[in-house]
Image: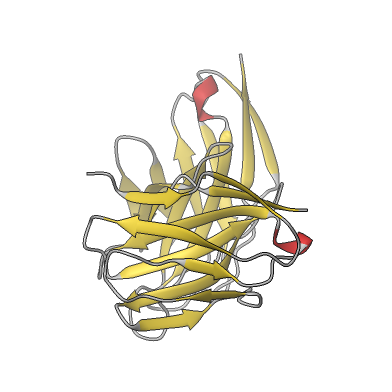
Amino acid sequence: NAGVTQTPKFRILKIGQSMTLQCTQDMNHNYMYWYRQDPGMGLKLIYYSVGAGITDKGEVPNGYNVSRSTTEDFPLRLELAAPSQTSVYFCASRPTGDYGYTFGSGTRLTVV
Amino acid sequence: LAKTTQPISMDSYEGQEVNITCSHNNIATNDYITWYQQFPSQGPRFIIQGYKTKVTNEVASLFIPADRKSSTLSLPRVSLSDTAVYYCLVGSYGGATNKLIFGTGTLLAVQP
């Protein structure tokens, strides 16, 4: 099993550009999450989803959007990139009733 | 969500047992305690989870006193490869609470 796959691994954006961070899981997990991690800090929850068609805001949702049209995919959209969005982004998933999250390897985003 | 407090950093030597304590005074009845390990440039990895008393797996042990206001992650005979950040998280996994909030974690540095 591939687990949680994130693409791209690295990206440099200019201020004001847009992009989509992709996240796919092949474990049939209902719950999916997006976190960001700034240097030397813990993870901050951006958005999460409890199933296809259902999403909700986390701690730091401003500047981001998500959608969940299928169980497998949970893309994160940045519409107008700002330097404050420079971070490492992690996608994670877990099955219903289980307590172990599986994380992807992350996307390192730099906004200049 | 229950707030957790952990030491910012700890030092140890190879072969020693390491105990990392986490305080969670406001833990709710339905909350579980989960620990994750994160290496640089990687997503967090699930280590262990418990509700009360003691839980042991092939990697670590988790000790939870009767009042559940704290927990201790025990790593037996650490090696250099155990150098990482360790996160203690508290939360329930159903109903209105479907997400985990990460703190800043404990940076464990293992020296030869």
Q: Quadrant of residue B52?
A: bottom left
Task: Please state which of residues A105 and A67 is positioned toward the viewer in this rendering.
Answer: A67
In percent of width and height, residue B11 lies at 67, 30
Q: Residue at image x 27%, y 70%?
A: A30
Quadrant of the frame with the N terminus of chain A: top left
Taking the image as drawn, is residue B67 in sight? no
Compared with B45, A90 (above or below) is: below
The residue lying furthest to the bottom in this view is: B96
Task: Please state which of residues A8 and B21 is positioned toward the viewer in this rendering.
Answer: A8
In percent of width and height, residue B76 lies at 43, 29
In percent of width and height, residue B31 lies at 41, 72
In percent of width and height, residue B37 lies at 49, 43
Q: Residue at image x 42%, y 76%?
A: A67
Position of residue B34 in the picture relative to residue B105 (left or right):
left
Compared with B19, A65 (above or below) is: below
Taking the image as drawn, is residue A74 in sight? yes
Q: Quadrant of residue A19?
A: bottom right
Q: Residue at image x 59%, y 36%?
A: B40
State the scheme by which the image is colored: secondary structure
